[in-house]
Image: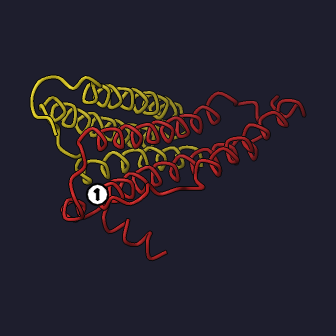
């Protein structure tokens, strides 16, 4: 394995951009969630769900930021399964919030 | 089923992946990571679609709206869980030098998305969209 210089395939950069795209997708879902929560029936439940979605979004942002920083190393390490699990959990949490809002 | 249980255990035990086989070229792992992220984006898009059906089709009969939204949300959850499971299995296969796992999931997801799309068409053509 090579240790120095630039990877001609720009793999770390592409992976970083993939994380950014995923963060963007998460932002869109979170914005739709906030809109649904604030337009719903009861204001208290709406505010709670909105806060929940916001914290899920912030958590995803933090995970993505951590990984993006780790990817600037010259030979990045394997994505930690815990981080992958956390990102998956954020997605599932948004889906559960959505189900709560729809029902 | 046993395989699934082993994979689920690997989700929670980061050290176990590194214990197996040899470390592949990091570029292969990064490609695997991007595939994982692409599936996660698909899952997020499905969740977003669930929200969109609920919010932007207010004229739809509540039964149809609820059914379509829940179908999209369930597909999103499945897609996210499958994303991490496939990532773990690919990583393990690369370390052990085995073939990459094959999967019926993409075909299944296509069928579900097609079914939702057909349902939408039926709703619009049938005039239930209000």
Q: Position of residue B16 (x, y in %)?
A: 22, 65
Q: Position of residue B63 (x, y in %)?
A: 75, 47
Q: Is residue A21 above or below residue A55?
A: above
In this view, the residue farthest toward the right is: B126
| Front in this rendered view, residue A1 or B62 | A1
| Front in this rendered view, residue A45 or B120 | B120
Subunit ID for the residue under disc 1: B
| Residue visible at 32% across and 32% down in the picture | A19
Chain B image colour: red
| Residue visible at 34% across and 42% down in the picture | B33
In this view, the residue farthest toward the left is: A4
Q: Position of residue A60 (x, y in %)?
A: 30, 38
| Residue visible at 41% across and 48% down in the picture | A93
Q: In the image, is A24 to the left or to the right of B47?
A: left
| Helix, strand or loop for disc 1 | helix
Q: In the image, is B120 to the left or to the right of A5?
A: right
| Front in this rendered view, residue B119 or B51 | B119
Give the quarter of the image for residue A79.
top left
| Front in this rendered view, residue B38 or B21 | B21
Q: In the image, is B11 to the left or to the right of B39?
A: left
Give the quarter of the image for residue B12.
bottom left
Crowd rating for badge 1 (residues with CA inside 10 Å; few <14, some 14–19, many 20+):
some
Chain displayed in yellow: A
Residue that badge 1 annotates? B95
Placement of the C terminus of chain B among the 4 image quadrants: top right
Q: In the image, is B2 to the left or to the right of A23?
A: right
Q: Position of residue A25 (x, y in %)?
A: 43, 30
| Residue visible at 30% across and 31% down in the picture | A15
């Amino acid at each position: 394995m090579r240790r120095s210089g630039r990877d001609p395939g720009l793999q770390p950069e592409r992976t970083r951009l993939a994380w950014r795209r995923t963060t963007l997708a998460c932002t869109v879902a979170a914005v739709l969630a906030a809109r649904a929560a604030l337009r719903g029936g009861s204001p208290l439940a709406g505010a709670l769900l909105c806060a929940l979605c916001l914290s899920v979004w912030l958590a995803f942002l933090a995970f993505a930021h951590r990984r993006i920083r780790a990817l600037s190393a010259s030979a990045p390490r394997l994505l930690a399964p815990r981080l992958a699990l956390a990102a998956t959990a954020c997605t599932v949490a948004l889906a559960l919030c959505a189900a709560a809002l729809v029902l | 089923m046993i395989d699934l249980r082993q994979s689920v255990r690997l989700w929670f035990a980061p050290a176990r992946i590194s214990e197996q086989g040899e470390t592949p070229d990091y570029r292969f792992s990064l490609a695997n990571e991007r595939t994982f992220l692409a599936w996660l984006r698909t899952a997020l898009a499905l969740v977003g679609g669930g929200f969109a059906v609920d919010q932007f089709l207010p004229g739809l009969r509540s039964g149809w709206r609820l059914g379509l939204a829940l179908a999209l949300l369930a597909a999103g959850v499945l897609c996210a869980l499958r994303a991490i499971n496939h990532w773990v299995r690919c990583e393990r296969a690369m370390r052990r030098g085995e073939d990459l796992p094959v999967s019926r999931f993409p075909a299944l997801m296509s069928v579900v998305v097609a079914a939702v799309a057909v349902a939408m068409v039926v709703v619009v053509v049938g005039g239930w969209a209000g």
